[in-house]
Image: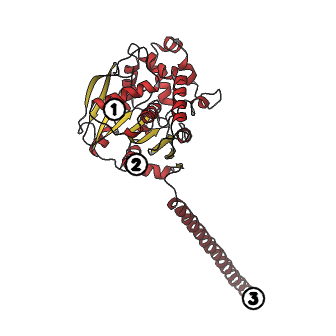
Amino acid sequence: MKGIIQIKVKTKTENNFNDNKKEDNKKRSKVFLSAFILVICLTLITLSLSSTILNTNYSSSFFVYAKEQSENDNVNNKTTSSDTIEYTHHKTLVNGILMHYVIGGKGDPIVLLHGWPETWYEWRHIIPQLIDNNYTVIAPDLRGLGDSEKPQTGYDKKTVAEDIYQLVKKLGYSKVYLVAHDWGGPVAYSYSAEHPQDVRKMVILDTLLPGFGVEEAAKFSPNGIWHLSFHAVRDLPEKLIDGQEDTYLNWFYDHYSYNQSAITSEAREEYIKQYSKPGALRAGFEYYRAVFEDAEQNKEYAAKQKLLDMPILTIGGEAGLGNLTTTSFQKIANNVTGMTLPNTGHFIPEERPHFLIKQILEFFK
């Protein structure tokens, strides 16, 4: 009886083992088949993306993906620093005002035009690399800002552009490359519209043109740029902000950057010191108060002449103005290449310096 029971139990165990083995084999086959299908799908997707990238037209607007951006941020990241590259500070009389500027290097001139609330100092990471790549770099403090003189008038961008044009001529140059950020962008447009034969190429960073985008951006909405209208009010902003420059300016460095630490404590101290000088706040706000005059000037430029012909590269931060910079400049030029950077705010020269250096060098070569 025991033998019979043992035989039956043994037989059942063997059968279960065989059944389980078959079931395991089936499961393995399904897993291998699923994995094979997944590999095929990923391969097809990769080939499709590669084809898209290879067929990208450089003259159109496009988006730089985060991985590519991160890699490009580390390209050309040499050890060159302001300690090893010489540039000097000067002041000179141009267009009736005393203008401060930084200059260094030898080669074709690149003029760097800063924005608000910054000074020439926003280019501190950019200047040494451009000098190291055989360019002459000229970085002025725009009229009324930084260490330049602070007159009561002349903040329309046509006048500010004339300041820069006279500085370039006084330094002995004619044809230049322009790199401009924020209010520097409209100044660069006025410069190139007045002297198109003297501008080789331009790089424009996260800005809009009065008459071609600024007004729409200032509209009352959750995404509207509220300070455009506030700064345009006569006298009130200065009275409210005087003595609170650090609180007010730090708000912009914190909220209009993607990476707040990119605007370092040293940089903030420098900017706040400059905008706390007598007349500095008012001068900065005058750039906004001139916006309607700027719009009329820009529309006159566009009406009396053809679209600008020189190549223009526009770069917007995804957390800044995004593609709006490209859209704005496409209305006044016919050779615009647009780019939008993810994980980047308004302050591109400080948030993405190595990426920007690479773009400038490739675009200007």
Compared with 324, 140 (above or below) is: above
- Front residue of 302/72: it is 302
Residue 53: give x, y in percent of width and height.
51, 59
Give the secondary structure at mark 1.
Answer: strand
Earlier in the chain: of badge 3 and badge 1, it is: 3
Res 200 label? none
CB within 8 Å, label 2 to label 3 = no
- The three-letter code of the residue at mark 3 reads Ile
Q: CA distance from mark 2 to mark 1?
A: 19 Å
Residue drawn 44% across the image and 44% down it? 310
Residue 44: give x, y in percent of width and height.
58, 68
Find disc 3 in the rendering and name its residue. Answer: 4
Res 363 label? 2
How dense is the environment of label 2, judged by Cα within 10 Å: few (below 14), some, or many (20 and up)?
some
Residue drawn 70% across the image and 81% down it? 19
Q: CA distance from mark 2 to mark 3?
A: 89 Å
Res 139 label? 1
**Scheme of image coloration:** secondary structure
